[in-house]
Amino acid sequence: MKISARNIFRGTVDALRTGAVNSEVDLTLSGGEKLVAMITNESAQALELAAGKEAVALVKASSVLVMTDEAGIRLSARNCLAGTVKAVTSGPVSAEVTIALTGGTEVHATITHNAAEELGLKPGSAATAVFKASSVILGVPA
């Protein structure tokens, strides 16, 4: 299957917490990073999710925010993946930012050109990819 989501994270389910409507799924990515997804209970059951099961997390680049200074900032977004800017591809309106995580995984974000400039994004600079757990789509190998 081919998909348009730029971020494809492979990992293993660490924990599954079931609520009244939704389930919170904790994944450990292949590089050791942690990721959280919020999906419906029906989806969790259909995917037969359980601790130890392999899963794939998909996140559109447009759902990823980029942060460069987290001093004193607390966020409601569950996923904050710190790394180093690998590349910035600027266009007249938007820019694509690639952040390399320490474990080798890459995160792609599409932000405005002005935001990329204001954040001073350039290869080698520290940056954190931020996205909500509800922006994560989970799949499992067929």
Image (spheres, rainbow, N blue to C red):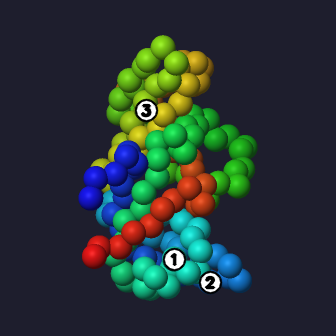
Per the rendering, the mark at residue 97 is 3
User: Is there a contact, CB below 8 Å, between mark 1 and mark 2?
Assistant: no
Per the rendering, the mark at residue 43 is 1
Front in this rendered view, residue 88 or 62: 62
The residue at 54%/65% (across/down) is 36
Residue 20 position, x and y percent, is 71, 83
Front in this rendered view, residue 6 or 66: 6
Neighbour tally class for label 3: few under 14, some 14-19, many 20 plus, Cα within 10 Å = many
Residue 112 position, x and y percent, is 55, 25
Which of marks 1 and 3 precedes in the sequence? 1
- Please name the amino acid that badge 2 sits on: Thr
State the CA–CA distance, disc 1 to disc 2: 11 Å
- Please name the amino acid that badge 3 sits on: Val
Per the rendering, the mark at residue 103 is none
The residue at 59%/80% (across/down) is 41
Nearer to us: label 3 or label 1: 1
Neighbour tally class for label 1: few under 14, some 14-19, many 20 plus, Cα within 10 Å = some
Q: Is residue 126 visible?
A: no
**Disc 1 element:** helix
Tell me: residue 40, above or below residue 94: below
Q: Which quarter of the image is occupied by the N terminus?
A: bottom left
For disc 2, the marked residue is 18
Q: Is residue 142 visible?
A: yes
Neighbour tally class for label 2: few under 14, some 14-19, many 20 plus, Cα within 10 Å = some
State the CA–CA distance, disc 3 to disc 1: 31 Å
Tell me: residue 52, above or below residue 7: below
**Disc 3 element:** strand
